[in-house]
Image (spheres, grey):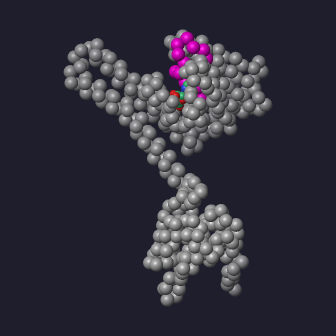
């Protein structure tokens, strides 16, 4: 026996659809709208029926329905339906009878906001990466050309230009390394291998690694921690990357003879580590953005320090992929505190 769909089935199907669906008669009056469409236009159940899109207050969609009813072709558009901020893809198709005459129309509304935001983020990212790669390349090219044009005959100038080229090449390779590490964590390609780790040992080792930069700026770096600190669960290499990026920033953005305090304390099932510096600080309005890729408060200063603008984005990804959190507090002219939390074993 072949089962036939009755109205009950059709109503259930319409109600379960995520897309908004509205059907119109030949004059553009609404015959039926599903729940998603009613939500979309912020009306109660049955509130759309009998009305035209003009009465509902959407001139653009009214014009689309008119066109379909008049010409019998399908039309598509992407639109923001007021007062919402989501982007909807609207597809209107004619409904024809057996004699192929236009009897009405059906409009389907699909929320494409996430897809559009993703497209925009992707193109912004590609734009940023290209810009970041082009800047050092342009500078390298300029210095090489000047050297070839004769500057290399002067050995002092030659040495100075070569050391700039060396620094720019270094920055390019750091940028590519940061991009690869961000993409491998984001794409989950880099398998996180959490093991019990002694955070105190990792912090001491990172302080040693960055020892030369610390002494070069005559900074005073202190490490204070709870007497009893549990082991944390972390991938040791990734944890080191987090600690290096945070200490490296504290060093970079703190003037000579400044102070950096690293504190680790246990709160229930987490160990919270903070890096407090007496550096330049970050303006209040920039705080929510510092963990974004390529966001820099002061572009020139970051570049001058050899920054890639990716360090904090990497920190955030690594910490969150371990189930932890990142935070920042800062006051311009007084200093900043960056914090990360990791789960204890
Ligand atoms: P960068 O490579 O530019 O240092 P990050 O992602 O590590 O990139 O940091 C993003 C931006 O946040 C920096 O350019 C800087 O403006 C700001 N920032 C990060 N750490 C500090 C800090 N300790 N003090 C002041 N500003 C900071």
The magenta-colored residue range is 242-260
Q: Residue at x 51, y 30 (%)?
A: 297
- For the N terminus, the image quarter is bottom right
Task: Tell me, yes or no, if residue 125 can be seen here.
Answer: yes
Q: Nearer the viewer, residue 181 or 213?
A: 213
In the displayed structure, 9 sits above or below 280; it is below
Q: Nearer the viewer, residue 35 or 114?
A: 35
Q: Residue at x 57, y 14 (%)?
A: 258
Task: State the image quarter where residue 164 is shown.
Answer: top left
x, y percent for residue 306: 45, 25
In the displayed structure, 271 sits above or below 16; it is above
- For the C terminus, the image quarter is top right
Q: Please check the rendered image and state whether residue 248 is part of the magenta-colored stretch, yes or no.
A: yes
- In this image, 148 relative to 175: left or right? left
Q: Residue at x 64, y 71 (%)?
A: 48
Q: Please check the rendered image and state whether residue 101 is part of the magenta-colored stretch, yes or no.
A: no
- In this image, 172 relative to 95: left or right? left
Task: Tell me, yes or no, if residue 237 can be seen here.
Answer: no
């Amino acid at each position: 026996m072949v089962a036939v769909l009755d109205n009950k089935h059709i109503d259930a199907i319409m109600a379960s659809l995520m897309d908004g669906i509205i059907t119109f008669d030949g004059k553009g009056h609404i015959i039926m709208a599903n729940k998603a469409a009613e939500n979309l236009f912020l009306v109660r159940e049955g509130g759309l029926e009998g009305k035209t899109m003009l009465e509902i207050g959407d001139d653009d969609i009214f014009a689309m329905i008119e066109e379909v009813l008049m010409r019998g072709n399908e039309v598509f558009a992407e639109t923001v339906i007021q007062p919402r901020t989501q982007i909807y893809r609207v597809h209107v198709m004619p409904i024809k009878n057996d004699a192929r005459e236009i009897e009405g129309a059906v409009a389907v509304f699909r929320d494409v906001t996430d897809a559009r935001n993703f497209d925009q983020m992707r193109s912004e990212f590609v734009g940023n990466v290209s810009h970041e790669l082009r800047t050092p390349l342009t500078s390298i090219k300029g210095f090489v050309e000047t050297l070839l044009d004769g500057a290399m005959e002067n050995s002092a100038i030659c040495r100075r230009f070569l050391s700039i080229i060396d620094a720019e090449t270094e920055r390019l390779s750091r940028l590519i390394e940061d991009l690869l590490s961000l993409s491998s964590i984001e794409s989950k390609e880099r398998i996180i291998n959490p093991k019990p780790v002694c955070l105190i040992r990792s912090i001491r080792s990172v302080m040693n690694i960055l020892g030369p930069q610390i002494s070069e700026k005559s900074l005073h770096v202190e490490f204070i921690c709870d007497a009893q600190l549990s082991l944390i669960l972390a991938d040791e290499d990734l944890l080191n990357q987090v600690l290096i990026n945070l200490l490296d920033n504290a060093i970079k953005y703190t003037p000579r003879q400044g102070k950096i305090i690293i504190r680790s304390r246990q709160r229930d099932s987490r160990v919270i580590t903070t890096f407090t510096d007496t550096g330049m600080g970050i303006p209040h309005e920039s705080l929510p953005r510092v963990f974004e890729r390529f966001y820099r408060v002061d572009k020139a200063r970051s570049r001058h320090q050899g920054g890639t603008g990716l360090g904090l984005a990497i920190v955030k990804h690594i910490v969150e992929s371990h189930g932890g959190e990142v935070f920042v507090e800062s006051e311009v002219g007084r200093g900043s505190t960056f914090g990360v939390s990791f789960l204890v074993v």
